[in-house]
Amino acid sequence: MTGAKSLGEFELIDRFFSRPSSVAARSDVILGVGDDAALLCMPAGADLVAAVDTVVAGRHFPLDSDARSIGHRALAVNLSDIAAMGATPAWATLALTMPRADEQWLQGFADGLMALADAHGVALVGGDTTSGHLTVSIQIMGHVPRGTAMLRSGAREGDLLVVTGTLGDAGAGLALVTARMATDDRAASDHLIERFEYPIPRVQFGIAARGIANAAMDLSDGLVGDLPKLARASGLAAHVDVGRLPLSRAMQSLGWDDQARDWALAAGDDYELLLAVPPTRLDELSDAAHRLDLKLTAIGELRRGNGVHWTLDGRAFSAPAHGYDHFL
Ligand code: ADP
Ligand code: MG
């Protein structure tokens, strides 16, 4: 691109992604960026928890998104997977593919990514840099005390289904940034766009919920896409009262009622946690959420059977057919 200063591969890795300070802060990083591979030291008696998530320009975020938001989101979606397991995040590697090495873009991207990494004490220990269509793939690694990770398959009959935060905000935010929807309510609009651009992975809550909840997953594809996965993995039927889905004040103030409910059910990108908790332990989980200033809402329960059964005002409700799916 004319006007933009271009950098070589090694210079850009050195400038933006090799951060000795964040590595020095972790005694479990024996070797970070710079060699053929990173060397990491697992705590004794822990299970390694690893996940990878890719975000593609024009697919997971609009092509003209702010670089800082792209950096933040790419890591946030991965931290959200770690949170869903109840794990403590520790290390990440970054595979970055971009059309050109634009210094200003890289600065914003690295700022967004590193600010979130620092907030969670995560060290970037390696990666790969290539040219092509803008694609960011992050591998995250963390750990849990052996055998304690929260699985999708752990739910029991009678467990309550609870969700953190509010649902549908990111769907509304995306509709607003892409101008599919518009409003004069600037404060509400800013809040919803922020929820899309800067999702907050529920890492501390995931750790707190470990040992209380029987099962958990994060909501990346919307409840209609994700809940069937938990129900199926646990061999149970999920019953959800759609009227109880938590909507943010910003969302409610816009008065887009049916649309808001659809976003809450199917838009995805919220990165809240969905958990199954025995009724006897709901108070404990609510206290943990309260301490983190996080809203927690019971939306239904798990019973014998299979599938997901939606109701609204006591009647069967037909939910949107599917959540976000790349191939549908
Ligand atoms: P190799 O050819 O051995 O894969 P590279 O030349 O690709 O090594 O990378 C050199 C070093 O820089 C490696 O330690 C690699 O992990 C790291 N690295 C490359 N790209 C990134 C990136 N985008 N973020 C963080 N580390 C990176
Ligand atoms: Mg390489």
Image (cartoon, grey):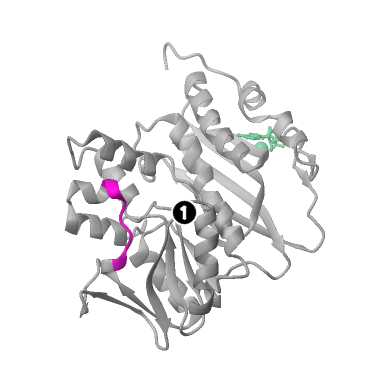
Query: What residue type is disc 1 on?
Result: Leu
Viewport quadrant of the C terminus? bottom left
Residue 136 vs 5, above or below: the answer is below
The residue positioned 35% from the left and 34% from the top of the image is: 63
Q: Residue furthest top?
A: 3
Residue 276 vs 97, above or below: the answer is below
Q: Where is mark 1, residue-wise?
A: 294
The residue positioned 17% from the left and 51% from the top of the image is: 256
Residue 228 appears in view: yes
Residue 171 vs 281, above or below: the answer is above
Q: Position of residue 118 (x, y in %)?
A: 62, 37
Please give the count of numbered marks on the rendered protein.
1
Q: Quadrant of ligand 2?
A: top right
Secondary structure of residue under mark 1: loop
Q: Which residues are magenta?
A: 244-250
Viewport quadrant of the N terminus? top left
The residue positioned 33% from the left and 40% from the top of the image is: 191
Tell me: 90 left or right of 97.
Answer: right
Q: Residue furthest bottom?
A: 304
